[in-house]
Image: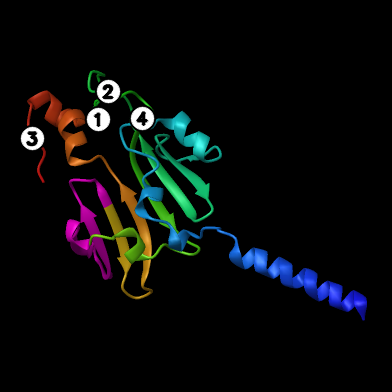
């Protein structure tokens, strides 16, 4: 009988500790969490310090996928600056992050947690998917695809911001043009 009571006390303590501990799930993460990797600032080395070594794309070694606890992070890297002889898109060193797309799988983040100020985002149908809405902010370079069917965030993409495009987009740098909004 004493052993039973002791086991109940231990079980109760463990349950209290687990329930009161402050652990985060993906669904409770704010947008700041998803912006850790910044286009045109981070490079492959800094990304690989956040994740384990990635897998290069079959047709393009500059697109690398990384496994993460929430799904997959696809990172596109620069092929080099505008001065190189072949076509370049961004005036940054090779292996600089160009775009990050997070494909959520388990415990997708809540849309309200990501978009606290919906007024800063425009919406459009996500490609030809009529059951998906894309919330985007060109100025910030953020795009979030939301499924109306499953009521979940499908992916989060971070691209160069409006200001970054002005400085680093090869077609704009060469011609001194302003990016289209």
Question: Percent position (x, y) of residue 47?
Answer: 46, 36
Report the number of discs: 4
Point 28% across, 43% down: residue: 159
In-front residue for pair 153/88: 153
Q: Please give the label number shown on residue 90.
A: 1
In magenta segment, residue 110: no
| x and y, in percent, of residue 118 in the image | 22, 62
| Range shown magenta | 118-142
Query: Do the numbered discs 3 and 4 sit on residues whose CB atoms are within 8 Å?
Result: no
Question: For the residue labelled by badge 4, is the local secondary structure a helix, a strand or a loop?
Answer: loop
Residues tagged 4 and 1 counted as in contact (Cβ below 8 A):
yes
Would you say the residues marked 1 and 2 are in contact, meaning their CB atoms lie under 8 Å apart? Answer: yes
Q: Quadrant of residue 27?
A: bottom left
- Give the CA distance from mark 1 to mark 3: 15 Å
Q: Is residue 67 left or right of residue 75?
A: right
Q: SS at mark 3? A: loop
- Compute the Cα span from label 2 to label 3: 19 Å
Give the distance between the C-alpha atoms of the residues marked 1 and 2, in whole angstroms: 6 Å
Is there a contact, CB below 8 Å, between mark 2 and mark 4?
no
Query: Which badge, 1 or 2, is on the more N-terminal residue?
Result: 2
Neighbour tally class for label 2: few under 14, some 14-19, many 20 plus, Cα within 10 Å: many
Q: Label 2 belongs to which residue?
A: 81
Q: Which mark is residue 108?
A: none
**Badge nearest the viewer, 1 or 3:** 3
For disc 4, the marked residue is: 96
- Residue in the picture at 24% in, 19% down: 85
In the rendered view of the protein, which quadrant contains the N terminus?
Answer: bottom right
Residue picked out by circle 3: 178
């Amino acid at each position: 009988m004493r052993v039973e009571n002791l086991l109940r006390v231990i079980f109760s303590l463990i349950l209290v500790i687990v329930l009161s501990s402050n652990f985060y799930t993906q669904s409770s993460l704010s947008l700041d969490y998803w912006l850790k990797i910044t286009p045109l600032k981070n490079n492959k080395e800094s990304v690989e310090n956040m994740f384990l070594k990635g897998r290069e794309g079959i047709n393009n070694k500059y697109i690398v996928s990384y496994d993460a606890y929430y799904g997959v992070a696809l990172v596109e890297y620069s092929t080099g600056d505008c001065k190189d002889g072949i076509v370049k898109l961004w005036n940054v060193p090779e292996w600089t992050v160009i775009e990050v797309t997070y494909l959520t799988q388990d415990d997708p983040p809540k849309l309200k947690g990501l978009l606290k100020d919906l007024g800063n985002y425009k919406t459009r149908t996500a490609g030809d998917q009529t059951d998906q809405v894309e919330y985007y902010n060109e100025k910030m370079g953020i795009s979030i695809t939301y499924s109306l069917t499953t009521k979940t965030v499908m992916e989060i993409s971070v691209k160069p911001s409006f200001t970054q495009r002005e400085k680093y987009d090869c077609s704009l740098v060469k011609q001194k043009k302003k990016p289209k909004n």
